[in-house]
Image (cartoon, helix red, strand yellow):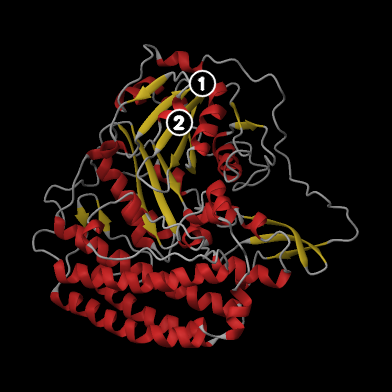
Amino acid sequence: MMSGWIEGLQPLGRLTDPYEKTGSSCSIVLAREDLRDAVVGLYEEGFFLEDITGMDFAEGFATVYHFDHPQEPCRASLYVTVSHQMPAIPSISDIFTGAEWHEREVADFFGIRFTGHPDPAPLLVPDDMDSPPLIKGEEDRIPFEGFLNACGGVDKPNASQLFSQGEPQHALPDPGLRRSEGEDDPDTMVINMGPQHPSTHGVLRVILRLDGEYIVEARPVIGYLHRMHEKMAETRTWVQYIPNMGRVDYLNAMAWNWAYVGAVERLAQIRAPERAEYIRVIVSELNRISSHLVWWGALLLDLGAFTPIMYGFEDREHILDLLQVLTGSRLTYSFFRPGGVAGDVNDDFLKGCLKFVRHMRERLPMYAELVTENIIFRRRTEGIGLLPLEMCRRYGATGPVVRGSNLAYDVRRVEPYSIYHRFDFKIPVDTGCDAMGRYCVRMAEIEESLKIVEQAVEQIPGGDHILKKSPGPRWKAPPGEAYFAVEGARGKIGVYVVSDGGPKPYRVKLRAPGFSNLSLFGELVRGALFADAVSILGSLDLVIPEIDR
């Protein structure tokens, strides 16, 4: 799979740890001038860009590019290093369009500049911020060579040589405010959706340029809810950071719990008891259903129908009641632990899960009759927001967004984790590639999650819900790195952790699916009617705190 894109390259180093230990199938260190050739090779072999991560070391900055393949577990990680004095790397946004936002985020947090970037304006931080928040003090930096050795070592004997690269010859981009093309065109007008518009599902602003009723340009403006979760990770112990996960995506907190804890377990080679894995599956699938119910009701409310959100929230209450008894919370769960879960389930909880499964199955036909078959709703969604599969790949779209474009990419199947391989369930897809297709995928996923919950409850074994010697508040993770991904309600959630052997993470990178899914909105709505912007936004299922982090 990955031999072709490496041919012709001369990697400076190669990390040798296997996928089971780090979450990557191939990790190489590249010279800056070889980056674009490697990325072109990955693009031609069908990979998509997951995220770009910046890191600060004693010798300089390192930028990590994570790519994955939509048909098999095959993560490729590229490491490119630059000096602190001239941190400039070639942009890859003309190859993978979604890299435009990822590169702007790295520039915001580390001050790294990407030559050739089309829009280097700040994305998540204020325009006048002069101190990138993730740059470390000299006393806190670890040697890059030590990091490489912890990750399996490289071929070069002296890692400091990796930073002695020549500087780019052309000028760096100006990180000023973006000026739209056609800004002075008298035949167009600019309007704002947000930042308080109720249809944007959070504090999101979309700047729209219209030619009559048609959208010429749409530019999402994010960052209003930015809380710097990744910086907080560096000030908390490995276990103390878990509550942050419930606040990244308040509608799908269980999945974020799992992604972070899974990364820590992979880093430390910890395996949770089998009973804990079943509990994780049950609560995660219940949380997926509750998230889809909120999306369903909110989408219809955006389109002018009030009744569905009342039904959706009524059914969601059954799930929240179950999870409240188990976790003590109804929204921002902090339930997972390295080595298991915080509490065990009892027979009443399991019976309550089966009761909800029966109840929800009785309700779904009413949902279909009320909404799915409603001619007004279909006119607002069918043929609206046509999203080709190739656009999904260029932006790294995942979850129901890409499955609504007829690609059965689901982390639970393609990159299996936990015990999902034991359950019988389908990956719904739709050939419509439109807002209706994305709607139908999520509605079908509710039924599939009910099937998983039912099977997990019937098969759950006895035993412990957590390791007897699970990591405590002062636990120190072994040095190294690990990447762990789960299938969240909005798509692929990925957490990349780096440890220097201390009680706190050296670096935590959160891969939010909504970040990539929203980044394609500007291209997706170009030429669409202004009235359709709301249904297209709703079909993406956006949770803005997850996007901003």
Label 2 secondary element:
strand
Q: Which residue is under mark 2?
A: 78
Residue at the image point whose x is 51% and y is 32% from the top: 41
Name the disc covering residue 31, or none: 1
Q: Position of residue 50 (x, y in %)?
A: 47, 44
Up-down: is 247 above or below 160? below
Residue 283 located left or right of residue 292: left
Residue 107 located left or right of residue 245: right
Residue located farthest toward the right when viewing the structure as drawn: 186
* Mark 1 → mark 2, Cα distance in angstroms: 10 Å
Up-down: is 262 above or below 506? below
Q: Amino acid at mark 2?
A: Leu
Whether residue 128 is visible: yes
Q: How many marks?
A: 2
Q: Residues within 10 Å of mark 1 (few under 14, many from 20)?
A: some
Taking depth in this image into account, of 40 and 500 the one nearest to the observer is 40
Q: Nearer the N terminus, badge 1 or badge 2?
A: 1
Give the quarter of the figure containing the N terminus.
Answer: top left
Label 1 secondary element:
loop
Residue 341 located left or right of residue 60: left
Q: Amino acid at mark 1?
A: Ala
Taking depth in this image into account, of 217 and 233 the one nearest to the observer is 217
* Residue 503 placement: quadrant: top left
